[in-house]
Image (cartoon, grey):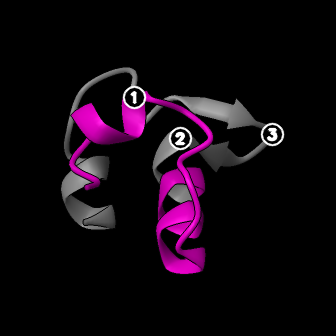
Amino acid sequence: MYVDCQSRPWPCSRFVDEGITLCAICQENCLKGGDYKFRQCYSCGFY
């Protein structure tokens, strides 16, 4: 899902924190099994 997310346009590949993209944050939330911190994760390819 991360690779698919990175290939999508803004806001998916935008930098949220210094050096950390929205995709990376969504991936981390997905791996931990928690709720997504940003609702854009769903439109960026995360379920």
- Residue at 57% x, 62% y: name it: 29
Q: Nearer the viewer, residue 43 or 12?
A: 43
- Return the residue at label 2: 22
Quadrant of the image occupied by residue 42: top left
x, y percent for residue 12: 37, 34
Left or right: where does residue 15 sit relative to residue 3? Answer: right
Badge 1 vs badge 2, beta-carbon distance below 8 Å? yes
Closer to viewer: mark 3 or mark 2: 2
Report if residue 12 is visible in the image: no
As drawn, the label of residue 40 is 1
> Type of residue at label 1?
Gln
Q: Position of residue 40 (x, y in %)?
A: 39, 28
How far separated are the C-alphas under marks 3 and 2? 11 Å
Residue drawn at point x = 77 percent, y = 37 percent: 17
Residues shaded magenta: 25-47
Which amino acid type is marked by label 2?
Answer: Leu
Give the labeled residue for mark 3: 18
For this orientation, the residue located farthest to the bottom is 31
For residue 35, side relative to residue 30 (left or right): right
